[in-house]
Amino acid sequence: MRAIVIGGLVIMCFFISYLLPIKDAVSQDAKSCLRCHGIKTLQKKSESGESISLFIDGTKFEKSVHGALDCSSCHPNITLKNHPKPRKIGSKNDYIKEFSPNCLNCHPKDALMKPAVHGTIVKKGDIYCSQCHGNHYIGSMKEWKNKVSFSEYCMSCHQFDISKTLPSKEKKNLRVNEQEIKKSVHGKFQCLVCHDDFSKVKHPVYNFKDKKQYTNEMNKICTKCHTDKELQKNPAHYALTKTASCIECHGYHGVKAAKVTKSLPENQYCLSCHSRAISMKFKNGETLSVQVRESDILNSAHKKLKCTECHKEFSPTQHPIRNFESLADYRAKSKDICNNCHQDAVKKYELSIHSAALKKGNQQSPDCLKCHDYHKVAFISKDKMASSELCIKCHSDSGKAFKESVHQMAIKQGKQNAPTCSSCHNSHDVLPTNLAKLGDSCIKCHKDAKISHNKWLWNPPVRLTSFVDLHFNSASCASCHTKAEKAIFLTLMERSKNKPITDEAVAKALNVDIKTLKSKIDSNGDGKIQEQELWKFMAAMKEKSKANLSGRIDVLNPNDAHKIEPKGKSIKDCSYCHNPGAPFKGQLEINKEGAKPVKFVIDNKSLNSAYAIPNIKDFYVLGLTKIKVLDILFFLALAGGIAVPIIHITLRILTAPIRRKRREGK
């Protein structure tokens, strides 16, 4: 039914068209076609629903370069014998794609390929003849070039979505948004002002290997007007030109006037440059990206702050040039920014092992930026498992050990007082484990620990918490609450100040190079500190720096200290430690500035040796410090103590008659 209606309308139009006047200038063939196609309202709907106009203005067609041709020259598949005949058209684009090969009947592909740029477009085949040249009113190229402006000439091609694939396989889009140019600071310029090597008769082809080279070469266009001397007026901007191209910040065609940028809200003003991939260069050649992602700031704890609240010396009117020796120097000084608001945290960090290690050149050591990032500063998390992720990034072994602990179990159960890394080690003032007094951290949560330990840890018949304190000070909690291998740690201390002596101070006291310190202590080089070696070393240190030893029981592998077990599995047997054969290793610790202490293996005999007697006042260690000589002396003293009253009583009994006679004689 639909086909009958359409056919009827076509026939009606065909007869009506004979009543319309047709100019004699067009060919007889064209006259016949224009009988219908000269009707302005003639149109067709494609299968995609688009309306396609079938109207041809005979006057305009007559003036075109094809005006003397018959319609069948371009439409060879349509004749008066087989037309009008309804045909299906999927869409406008489908029709253009189908029709374009007809142009090649007169314009051979070889000829079209001669102009290099035109040939590239033809070869790609994704832009069709009529999209650039039109359909029926194609003018003379020579006349058109003379009449059209340079920019209009360029836009005739660059208005389309054309692109170029570089040797690097990167794709460069060559489409130009004309409206963007008109709104830019260069809105009144013709294209040739910047692209002066192009003309209407000359279109060179650039062969850049990648986008970076393309960008750098395009940068030369800007310097034609914006000379080096002019750029130096703004030092920050000038410095930026040495690490980033003009295009990276200002774009290609939509360049805004500087006054427009300065009128933006402060953060948007800063991001107008810092949202791009720009970097700063340090004196030693290292570089740092200073790109800032707005999304990072908006999702951070600082989302309500202005840039200048942290970067106080900067503003829309001034941008000082900061020079740093290296990335390490930059990081070391970056905490000054954090100190604007977080003075307490920065002060504590300065006392930490992390700060000391960073100052000694350990670039892996954490600081404000390493833990909290530059602009992604996260809110303090209530998620206990997530809050320790920062620490686990570096201390992965400790993190694995913690997963086996009763504390991890408590976190999984959602207990509010379950500890995380910072609960024991603190967040900022993290100290070496031999100085941190981690037992105090345990007491914070286990407030009744002294009372509960006093039930079994006591000296009958006296129950005093001071006796518990003595044990807490000489043995770590982990030494009883884990199954890990235990060790006796002897730390070299400065007696007058009661602080660890560093390896540098020891080397200086012994007048040796720090690299040869180990061989100085372990003189026979067997990898163990023998009894004579240990006490010879201690004698020298006592003489030079009044050193002593502080002893404690702890787990041998520090990571194992995180495997805390339920209290039902803890050690509650005095003989476990108070036993000459206690299964403990021996370790000598010498503190190292900004790093973990240097450790030496001690032969266990060293602590059971008579050589220890002069130093026994310097430390007290359970079990392993029971010296046989002292045991013999103790038993002799004990025997003597018992023998004295017995002998005294015996003598009193034996001499009683004599004393009685003396009294009677008186």
Image: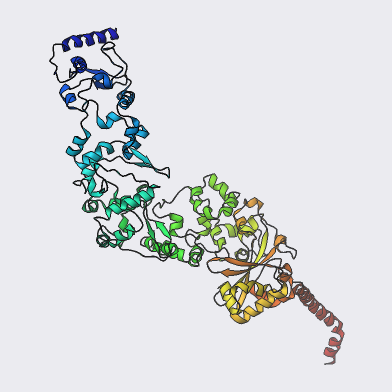
Residue 291 versus residue 646: which sits nearer the camera?
A: 291
Number of numbered tags placed on the structure image: 0
On the question of residue 299 being in view, the answer is: no
**Residue at the far bottom in the pictured view:** 666
Answer with left or right where residue 367 lies relative to residue 31: right
Who's the residue at 34% across and 35% down the image? Answer: 113
User: Where residue 301 sits in the image (x, y, percent)?
Assistant: 38, 51
Instruction: Indicate whether 246 appears above or below 121.
Output: below
User: Where residue 265 sits in the image (x, y, percent)?
Assistant: 26, 51
Answer with left or right where residue 416 lies relative to residue 513: left
On the question of residue 430 being in view, the answer is: yes
Answer with left or right where residue 246 lies relative to residue 462: left
Answer with left or right where residue 485 lies relative to residue 272: right
> How was this image coloured?
rainbow
Instruction: Indicate whether 234 appears above or below 265.
Output: below
The part of the image, by quadrant, that contains residue 432 is: bottom right
The part of the image, by quadrant, that contains residue 644 is: bottom right
Instruction: Indicate whether 187 appears above or below 618.
Output: above
Image quadrant containing the N terminus = top left
Who's the residue at 30% across and 48% down the image? Answer: 251
User: Where residue 546 sits in the image (x, y, percent)?
Assistant: 60, 79
Who's the residue at 21% across and 53% down the image? Answer: 259
User: Where residue 270 sits in the image (x, y, percent)?
Assistant: 30, 54
Residue 304 versus residue 133: which sits nearer the camera?
A: 133
Image quadrant containing the C terminus = bottom right
